[in-house]
Every structure is written in C-alpha cells, then in structure tokens.
Amino acid sequence: MSILNLAISLGILFGVAKGIQLFRRRCRHRFGYSFFTARGFWQAAISINFLWWGYYFWVAAPLRHAPPSGGLILVAIGIAAAAWLIYENVRDTDLLHGVGGSSLQLVLFFPVALYGIPLLAIAMLFLLFAMYKGAPAWFVDP
C-alpha cells in the first residue's frame, strides 16, 4: 500500500510539473511571454512578503497593544503589488492565461519568497562577518 501511495504521489507531482511546462511553452509560443522570470519572481516575492507580514502584524497588533493599521497598510501594499503583477501578465497575454500564470507565480514562488529571502539575507550577513579581514598583525621576534 505504501508503494502505491508513493507511485500516486509521484504521478501527481510529475503531472503537475508537466502541466506547468506545457503552460509555459504555450504562452511562450503564442504570446512570446514567459511568466517564470527573475522580474516575475521579484514582483511575486514583494507582494507575498507584504501580504504575509502585513497579515502577521495585523493579527499580532492586539497582543502588542499596537494599532492594527500598520498591518493593514502592509496588506494593502501587498494587494496593490499582486494586482500590478496580474495587470502586467494580463496585458502581455490574455485574461485567462494572465490570471492563470499569475496564480501559478504566486503559488510556486511562495515558499522561496517567504523563507528563502530571509535565509539568504542571514547567510549574506554571516558571510560578511566570516570573511571580514582585520588589519594585518606583524609578528616580530624580540
């Protein structure tokens, strides 16, 4: 039974990956537009992070005795960024492909955008301090 579950899970994963590839290829040939680019990733990452952290600050505001307006402002900025992403994708394709591609961008880039970018920043800070080189020390025998 475990092998059957594994086979079904791998089949579903392979089917979804193949569907995404076919969608990407169709949009590339029909419209000359690719959804999965670095620019698309950064637009999705900005909207995802604003939405996520805005929701977090909105929910945590009563616990911290703070006004929830800060979180709501972040959520509004995140919605505006997501709307701009959808607008650009619909403008360069058609309505069905633009909305579908935008939703794929937001879903597929979610884990990397939410967890990858802060981890990358931490790694960069670690590398900055690990590779810091102080002034040379001159050893002299007395």
Image (spheres, helix red, strand yellow):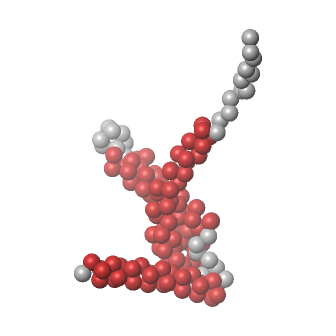
Q: Residue 34: where, in percent of width, then height?
A: 62, 77
- 3 to 64, vertically: above or below: below
Kindly identify the residue that appears in the image at 52 percent across and 77 percent down: 101
Side of 72 where 105 appears, left or right: right
Q: Nearer the viewer, residue 112 or 104?
A: 112
One can see residue 62 in this view: yes
Kindly identify the residue that appears in the image at 66 percent across and 83 percent down: 32
Kindly identify the residue that appears in the image at 47 percent across and 57 percent down: 114
Spot the residue most to the left: 1
Spot the residue most to the top: 142
Kindly identify the residue that appears in the image at 74 percent across and 11 percent down: 142
- 103 to 8, vertically: above or below: above
Q: Residue 74: where, in percent of width, then height?
A: 46, 52
The quarter in which the N terminus is drawn is bottom left
Side of 82 where 132 appears, left or right: right
One can see residue 95 in this view: no
Q: Nearer the viewer, residue 118 or 4?
A: 4
